[in-house]
Amino acid sequence: MEEKKKLIPRGKVIHAALIWETWVQTCYNYERMMGIACAITFLPVVKYLYPGNMEKQIEVMTRQAEFFNVHPEFGSCILGMAISLEEDKAQGANIPNEFITNLKTSLMGPLAGVGDTIYQGVLIPILLALCIDITRAGDGNIWGSIVYAILMLVISYGLSVGNFLFGYRAGGDAIMDFLEKGILNKILKAASIMGCMVMGGLIVNYVSVHCGIVINASGTEFKLQESLFDAVLPNILPLMATLAIYGAMVYRHWTSIKVIFAIVAVGIVGGFFGILV
Amino acid sequence: MTEFQALLCGLTYWIGVGNIPFVSLWIVQRPLVCGLITGCILGDPITGAVVGATINLVYLGFISAGGSMPADMALAGILGTAYAIVGNLDAQTALAIAVPLGILGTIVWYLRMTLDSIFVHMSDRYIAQGRFSMLRVSNVLLPCLFSGAISIAPAALAAYFGASYIQDFITFCAGTPMRIFQVIGGLMPALGIAITLQYIFKGEAKLFLFCGFIIATCSGLTLIEQGIVGLLVALLYVQVTDKVGTSAPSSGGGSSNATKDVSDPDYDPDED
């Protein structure tokens, strides 16, 4: 294994990684999801696997074009691994065709789950929250948008290419090992705690719910917002609104569209009667 | 708004939803970014960025997994920003108008996801013929042109005609309807936060939401400062619980279980 002769020049592997990250979703579709994107990732490397043997090359490309769907950045190691396996196979290793396909499909579920949660569920919301705050500071500025765009570009390409090369070097066992070691779990726990802290701040800064009810009791006006909520705990209404929506989505399985309609309904009723201002 | 500016808005929408390489999915699609671009097109970058940022609050934790698209944030960002600048709306009102439009935009996404199958079969043919480099045409060029065909015109038209009527509409809405828009706009960000909470408001982390809430209510820290405090607290917490975990004999058995939880593809937020 240590003496493994590499058929593919390193530059071509990096080229393949860049193709993957760049074109992964241009032809995203319900039939094959990212299948064709897998095939086009093999474009720079396939001719090194079986030089001059078109039949074998077609076989590799057909195999790689099958159904595949994963998180682009977290799942790129699977593509690296697939290239490495095809390389071993081309050098005579006894690897059945189904083994490569099965390994790909069995890894894509876990990596998509982890990737979507960490990337779209934690990393992007935290980054967005902080950059939105930068943008709206003072009279407003453009730096939040620019910082966000640059950071996301660097993170996406860095993570994707790095992960691709990791998969290429390490192979399927190492990916399994990594998933089972629980490192991701620790990252997820820490990120969730940080995320919760930021979301708590976000509720205070950006959700606005004000009660407009005024009670006339024996000539004195009792403003519910100022005299009750602001006196007990300011921002309690935004917190309650957020938790109510969270509860509806988690325990009643409301979709986001349903929540949007509910918010519009509450806004119309509350705004019309002056309950909310 | 001139015809040319409307066309540029349409092109921005294409870059946002078409998965055009380098920048699309995680970057231009976000209203924070496409709002700035729309602002540049209409000559008011700062308003664009601020309105885009406000609209983006709704879409903080929107997750597109398994080819689903819960709402079209790029369309909401571009149209909301354009209307805000042309109609001189405040950010919350723009948000209340933009979010329902974002739901309409998902049609473009589902149409594309369905019809892209044509290019899959084309690619299969090229592979069978051994003409691999033609994949650049069938996987990249043609799908991009197709998504342009279905996305540029609707967005440009909506920007152009919407903007010319928006002022009349707002004058018409003065008073109570306007207040309703602002109430809706104030509530909407709670949706973005609630969606994000589905992924992180779990187990031990739950308590920290209320910590963050109280710190923000009482301290006057900026969100960035609070984020740094959050990061430090998170690291501290993981370090401390890690020490406790390694000394307990049960941690070995628990770890494989925990990994299974994270790698669960149908991640269900109310599992625990």
Image: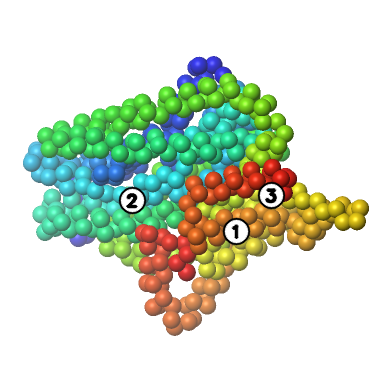
Give the side of residue A72 with respect to residue A153, left or right. left
Measured in 3D between alpha carbons, the distance from the residue under mark 1 to the one under mark 2, in whole angstroms, is 31 Å
Nearer to the camera, B190 or A7: B190
- The x and y percentages for residue B235 are 56, 64
Q: Which residue is mark 1?
A: A243
Q: Which residue is mark 2?
A: A70
The reply to whether callout 1 and callout 2 are in contact (CB within 8 Å) is no
Q: Quadrant of residue A224?
A: bottom right
- The x and y percentages for residue B149 are 36, 26
Measured in 3D between alpha carbons, the distance from the residue under mark 3 to the one under mark 1, in whole angstroms, is 13 Å
The reply to whether callout 3 and callout 2 are in contact (CB within 8 Å) is no
Q: Which mark is residue B64?
A: none
Mark 3: which secondary structure?
A: loop
Nearer to the camera, A192 or A184: A192
Q: Which residue is mark 3?
A: A209
Quadrant of image for the N terminus of chain A: bottom left
**Res A143 visible:** no
Mark 1: which secondary structure?
A: helix
Nearer the viewer's eye, disc 3 or disc 2? Answer: 3
Which residue corresponds to the image point at 50% horizontal and 49% vertical from the top-left? A258
Callouts 1 and 2 on one subunit: yes
- The x and y percentages for residue B75 are 49, 34
- Point out the tag, 3 or 2, that comes first from the N-terminus: 2
- Disc 2 crowd rating (10 Å Cα; few below 14, some 14-19, many 20+) is many
Seen as rendered, the residue at the extreme right is: A219
Amino acid at pointer 2? Val
Nearer to the camera, B103 or B214: B103
In this rendering, the count of numbered labels is 3
- Disc 1 crowd rating (10 Å Cα; few below 14, some 14-19, many 20+) is some
Measured in 3D between alpha carbons, the distance from the residue under mark 3 to the one under mark 2, in whole angstroms, is 39 Å
Which residue corresponds to the image point at 58% horizontal and 35% vertical from the top-left? B97
Callouts 3 and 2 on one subunit: yes
